[in-house]
Amino acid sequence: MVGRRGERRSTAMQVAGWSLDLRKSGVARFDLRDPYHLAMSLSWPAFVIGAFALMGSIHVFFALLYLASPGSVTNLAPGDFLSALFFSIETLATVGYGEMAPAGRWGHAVASAEIISGMSLTAILTGLLFVRFSKPKAHIVFADKAVVAAHNGVPTLMVRIANSKLTMLSVAQAKLGLLMVETTDEGHTFRRTHDLVLQRSDLLIFPLTWTLMHTIDGSSPLARLDRDELKTREARMFLMVEAHDVALDVQVRAIKGYAYDDVAFGMRYADAVSIDDEGRTIADLGRLSFLEPEITPHATPGDAGQWVPLPRGTAAVGVEED
């Protein structure tokens, strides 16, 4: 897309769950060459409004065609747009009430074209509605913030997620990535993606909550980064979770982005899973994002939120997930 003065306008990408404002230039927001992708990528309000706008445009178009030839519709007064519009709606829906009917070759031709258009449009909208309703959703919820706290004496990045469905998710897999600005020896800046290795990246069954952990040791890209450095390098973390929905027998995916200010140093997640009086395990998803101060050698109540990164070469100890 080119502006009046030749500048290239940017178009925002819509990616649910990402904290990064992604934009592209030279692309159209609505690509009419791929109507299926356009219809599937629209939000539900935009889709409904677009469907009604399309149907309304067709009704108006054929109503004007009927008015273009007086006498093409019986009992339709010349210039009576409202009656022509009602007749167009009834024809498109293949419903006739007997008061008005097409007359002459022009009227029958326009009515036939409208009926064919109506049947085609109905089939297309029915298919799109079915696909949109049947598209599986992961229903995986993420904590609002990631945390950095000590786990078995080692600084660890943690992200808590939960299965918000009452049905079981199985064979869950997670991947965590870090995107940040780096500078080459030649002085060029670019964005580089690093894989943050998780202590455990898969679960056989995922019924309640899952705390994903990345050990910040000497081999971690986070080993020498504190909060200020993360901000300077515009760091972003992206978590992708994929699982099998047992009830629907389909694969579902969810993604979540965390900006540098979405990382809480010296904090840990408050308990969200408890045991009731009858011995049943209960997960309170309302507490998924609740945090509490971490009292460790890396953070104390007086300096909660500060974190001393490990120097390069520090060895990690074995850590098991909670």
Image (tube, helix red, strand yellow):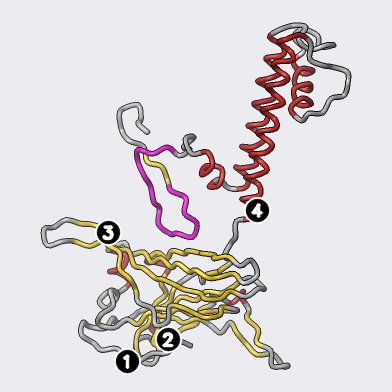
Q: Earlier in the sequence, mark 3 or mark 2?
A: 3
Which residue range is magenta in the image? Answer: 13-28
Mark 4, other Cα within 10 Å: few <14 / some 14–19 / many ≥20 = few
> Going by the picture, which residue comes out furthest to the left?
186
Residue 252 versus residue 315 in the image, above or below: above
Mark 4 lies on residue: 133
| Residue type at tag 2 | Pro
- Please give the residue where the numbered disc 3 appears in the rendered image: 191
Q: Amino acid at mark 3?
A: Arg
Percent x, y for residue 26?
Answer: 35, 38
Residue 317 badge: 1
Image location (x, y in percent) of residue 43:
58, 47
Q: CA distance from mark 4 to mark 1?
A: 47 Å
Q: Which of the two discs, 4 and 1, sits closer to the camera?
A: 4
Query: Which residue extends farthest right?
Result: 98
**Residue mark closest to the camera, 4 vs 3:** 4
Q: CA distance from mark 4 to mark 3?
A: 37 Å
Labels 4 and 3: the sequence-earlier one: 4
Between the C-alphas of marks 3 and 2, the distance is 35 Å
Q: Amino acid at mark 4?
A: Phe
**Quadrant of the drawing holding the N terminus:** top left
Q: Is residue 104 left or right of residue 267?
A: right
Callout 3: SS: strand
